């Protein structure tokens, strides 16, 4: 039987995505066996991230600097903004290295069932970025779910008064699919074939 502390660690790890109770116990056993090479470096890395983790004031990304690394990257095209629902979506799209612009994270999607209203999302921040000028294109990269498409439609209505090109990801992203679970090839094709909204 494991000590109370080891059991608590296994329970904490089992709450992570993809780890159930048995997998968490295997991870704990591995960490105990490899204290010097795995456990201690992991503890240091977690402590550093915990101390420095912040939300970017510009786009809403999670990083260790504010503004985040994407927002301060001078190689990024400031005239294009890709709007995503949440941080995993940004990371999935940016992994493809096909979108050269900046990002904007809404922090969710509109959902009447869950009580998520426009004022609950970072929509005003997006409107302010567009209204400030210098933006030529906004890409709506919402998940291909009913709520995602409702959010995209709402954003299109809010942005229609601005002189920008409004596009969305092309079909090919499966209906009901979420960006974070798609392979890089599907994401690449969706970005290349984006089309105007409306």
Image (tube, rainbow, N blue to C red):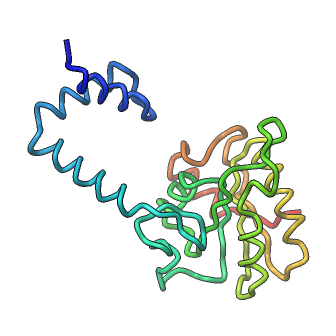
Which quarter shows the N terminus?
Answer: top left
Q: Which residue shows up at 18% across the image and 50% down it?
A: 41
Residue 189 in the image: above or below residue 38: below
Q: Is residue 121 left or right of residue 62?
A: right
Residue 149 in the image: above or below residue 98: above
The quadrant in which residue 121 appears is: bottom right
Q: Which residue shows up at 53% across the image and 80% down it?
A: 76
Count the numbered circles shown. Answer: 0
Residue 184 percent coordinates (x, y)? 50, 52
Which quarter shows the C terminus?
Answer: bottom right
Residue 69 percent coordinates (x, y)? 45, 73
Furthest residue toward top: 1
Q: Which residue shows up at 89% across the image and 72% down it?
A: 160
Nearer-the-camera pick, 174 or 117: 117
Nearer-the-camera pick, 102 or 194: 102
Residue 177 percent coordinates (x, y)? 65, 40
Nearer-the-camera pick, 90 or 113: 113
Q: Is residue 184 left or right of residue 140?
A: left
The quadrant in which residue 6 appears is: top left
Residue 120 percent coordinates (x, y)? 75, 54
Q: Which residue shows up at 20% across the image and 19% down it?
A: 3
Q: Is residue 70 left or right of residue 150?
A: left
Furthest residue toward front: 4
Residue 16 in the image: above or below residue 54: above
């Amino acid at each position: 039987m494991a000590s109370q502390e080891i059991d608590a660690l296994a329970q904490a790890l089992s709450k992570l995505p993809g780890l159930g109770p048995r997998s968490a116990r295997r991870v704990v056993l591995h960490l105990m066996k490899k204290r010097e090479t795995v456990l201690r470096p992991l503890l240091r890395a977690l402590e550093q991230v915990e101390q420095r983790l912040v939300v970017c004031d510009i786009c809403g990304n999670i990083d260790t600097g504010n503004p985040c690394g994407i927002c301060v990257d001078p190689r990024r095209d400031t005239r294009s903004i890709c709007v995503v629902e949440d941080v995993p979506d940004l990371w999935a799209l940016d992994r493809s290295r096909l979108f050269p612009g900046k990002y904007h994270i809404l922090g969710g999607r509109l959902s009447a069932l869950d009580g998520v209203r426009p004022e609950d999302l970072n929509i005003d921040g997006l409107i302010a970025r567009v209204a400030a000028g210098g933006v030529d294109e906004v890409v709506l990269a919402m998940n291909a779910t009913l709520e995602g498409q409702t959010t995209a439609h709402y954003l299109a209505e809010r942005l229609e008064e601005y002189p920008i090109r409004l596009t969305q990801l092309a079909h090919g992203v499966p209906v009901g699919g979420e960006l974070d679970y798609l392979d890089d090839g599907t994401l690449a094709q969706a970005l290349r074939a984006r089309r105007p909204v409306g």
